[in-house]
Image (spheres, rainbow, N blue to C red):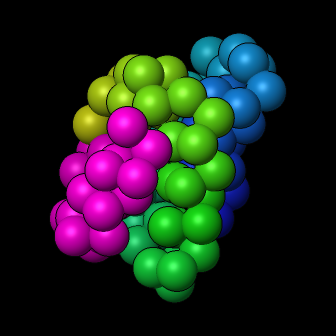
Amino acid sequence: GLRVIRALRFAVTKNFLLASGTEYALREGYAVKSLLRVAKERIMDELNKMFNSSVLNSLYMLNKFPDIRDAVFAENRVKLMATLKEVV
């Protein structure tokens, strides 16, 4: 669950490249289902770390995985907008 968003965070904050197998796994429906079982607070913590590192790279990474982006934004839309206002 949390590893899904953490993989994206590490790609953004540590400039890691995701292996093609990892990218494939993140595009599968299982990744979204497992992410939805994670507490909202833990997801927000990972998002805060991502966006504090780089707003542009965070948005780029989330847009590469639209199913994950939509799941994260749907669950955290209000908090995420507040976070973006603080970072920008």
Instruction: Decide if residue 27 is in sight here.
Output: no
Quadrant of the image containing the C terminus: top left
Nearer-the-camera pick, 65 or 77: 77
Q: Is residue 40 magenta?
A: no
Residue at (37%, 30%) from the top-left corner? 59
Q: Where is residue 56 in the image (x, y as percent from the top left)?
A: 42, 22
Residue 18 located left or right of residue 57: right
Q: Where is residue 71 in the image (x, y as percent from the top left)?
A: 29, 59
Residue 75 located left or right of residue 61: left
Magenta segment, which residues? Answer: 67-88
**Residue 57 vertical position relative to residue 43 in the rendered view, above or below:** above
Residue at (22%, 64%) from the top-left corner? 77
Nearer-the-camera pick, 47 or 69: 47
Q: In which quarter of the image is residue 54?
A: top right
Quadrant of the image containing the N terminus: bottom right
Judged by its main secondary structure, the magenta piece is helix
How many labels, in total?
0
**Residue 77 vertical position relative to residue 5 in the rendered view, above or below:** below
